Image (tube, grey):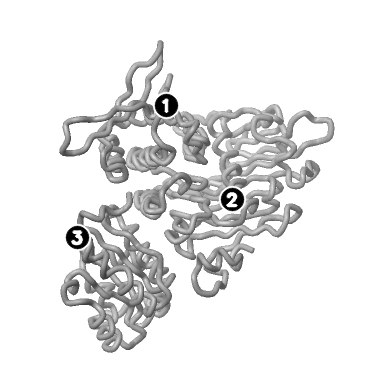
Amino acid sequence: MIERLYVQNFRCLESVTLHFAGKSSVLIIGKNGAGKSTTRKALAVFQRICRGSSRVDKLICPADFTLHNTERPMRFEIEVTLSGKRYIYAISFDWPAHFSEARILDESLSVDGQSVFTRQQAQIQLAAGSSFRLDWHVFALPVIDEKPPGRTIRDLTSFLGSLVITAPVPGNMTGFSEQPSSELEEDASNFGSCLRGLLETEFAVYAKFDEYLKSVIPDFSSIKNVDRGKDGKQLMVTFKKPDAQESLTVEFDALSDGEKCFFLGGYIIASNAAGLPVVCMWDEPDNHLSLSEVGQFIMGLRKVANRGGQFIAASHNPETVRKFSDENTIVLTRKSHLEPTLPKELKDINYHGDLIDALIRDEVIG
Amino acid sequence: MSVNRYQPHVLIIPEDRADEQIANGFTKHDQVTLKQVQVMPYADGWPGVLNKFMTQYISYLRNYKNAYIVLLIDFDAKYESQRHRFDTAVPDDLKDRVFVVGAKEDPERLRQVMGKGFEEIGSDLADDCYKDPRINYCHDCCGTAT
């Protein structure tokens, strides 16, 4: 579970700590430009480092520095608990004049307060005593190879690499896949590959996926991957009324935007039922859904927390806001583009009367 | 996953934000089937709940025979009079499908006494439904105060 996220000098997050400790599901609200999506992007920095992005230039550009000020270091720090151990991974960057990409200033990992490695620019120091040098544009975390049976780094990279961070663009979501995958793209464009990857490795979770989809799409019957082209597979979806003989089979790509989001919800819930619990950040999970579906959809995703997962949502939707408590809602405020984002917990904000009315009046996030 | 109006389902109408959070905690429980329970937007105090019930849900209950309604209110330490007020508002033909539930005083007091957040209280109440309803539902009436 993610316990804490600290971000410094990254876009509008000039110096922000978000506390998730004890919060298995969290809602982030705020006006447009307050930093909700930037929080998603900050989490994605860790995810992409752990998925094997080796060079800084793939992750950081000059516009990412707050107010484009590349003279101040940019820093990311994440604290997570895995199997009862507390991991803290931190990395900071600067962008010296005449450099064509950012440089890693320092990088470190500790577990339960014990250092695993530290880094100052190119110099890496392992806790075991050895040290080596590394290109200062290359991340150390994914390249350090622990001596067996050590799994500290592997456990962390596996956890952060498997974070589901998404702001799905249903139009981009395709059921076509050439290879199975376990790494969902941010826009969920590789949905077909990921569902294929999940069901090929954890076939037992199909029952969970099927149960969920039948609860949200009553005439959903089944899915099937059919051969398409030389190496490809196309996800096909069949609908059928329980008491009818006739059925309809369509390509996944032909589903509506909302239906594709249901499938993504099913993928997350089924993933959570298999193997390690899922930690998911979904930016505007209510997009594309009808009003009668939003509340139940959100609550279904919040239930991943009942099995050790974590669900973080960012939203403007009143129905979504209602489905979280004041204790697990974080409000981001930012007065102007020249000022930093400030986080506050909704429980610490005094609003009068109806919460949604107060949000509309700008009493809460103004 | 909206509730199926033609199958057995429960709509919860909370009195305020605190009650809404308790209801959310209840529905978040693993044993609660989301397809059959929906928390509606909260009303403006108990008069709001009563008004919503009378103007919207009496006809709803008559249209949908599998619907059940939970009115989640604060009894404000006036159990008898509040109970009577709601009992008289519910038509006889709907009495077995309408339930009035709530904190003896108000959720804030419940939170202080139980030392838990609203959602956690709701989740514990769901837990008690299939374990032992005397633990939380009756914490202040069965002599087992937490």
Q: Nearer the viewer, residue A86 or A8?
A: A8
Does the image show residue A22? no
Place of residue A284 in the rendered image (x, y in percent of width and height, measured from the top left): 50, 48
Question: Is residue A98 found left or right of A77 in the rendered image?
Answer: right
Which percent across, then down, holds residue A308? 38, 49
Q: Give the Cα distance between marks 2 and 1.
A: 28 Å
Query: Which amino acid lies under the numbered mark 3 shown in the image of this protein?
Result: Asn
- Name the residue at 34% across, 87% down: B77
Residue B26 to residue A85: above or below: below
Of the pair A337 and B25, the residue shown nearer to us = A337
| Disc marking residue B66 | 3
- Whether labels 1 and 3 belong to a single chain: the reply is no
Q: Which mark is residue A193?
A: 1
Q: Residues within 10 Å of mark 2 (few under 14, many from 20)?
A: many
Nearer mark to the viewer, of 2 and 3: 3
Q: Where, by quadrant of the figure, is residue A229 drawn?
A: top left
Label 2 sits on what residue type?
A: Lys
Q: Residues within 10 Å of mark 3 (few under 14, many from 20)?
A: some
Q: Which comes before the other along the chain, label 2 or label 1?
A: 2
Left or right: A105 in relation to B1 = right
Q: Position of residue A139 (x, y in %)?
A: 63, 32
Q: Secondary structure at mark 1?
A: helix
Q: CA distance from mark 2 to mark 3?
A: 41 Å
Judging from the image, what secondary structure is the residue with disc 2 in? helix
Q: Which residue is mark 2?
A: A36
Residue depicted at x 40% and y 47%: A309
Residue B44 lies in quadrant? bottom left
Relative to A33, residue A121 above or below = above
Cβ atoms under marks 2 and 3 closer than 8 Å: no
> Residue A121 got which mark?
none
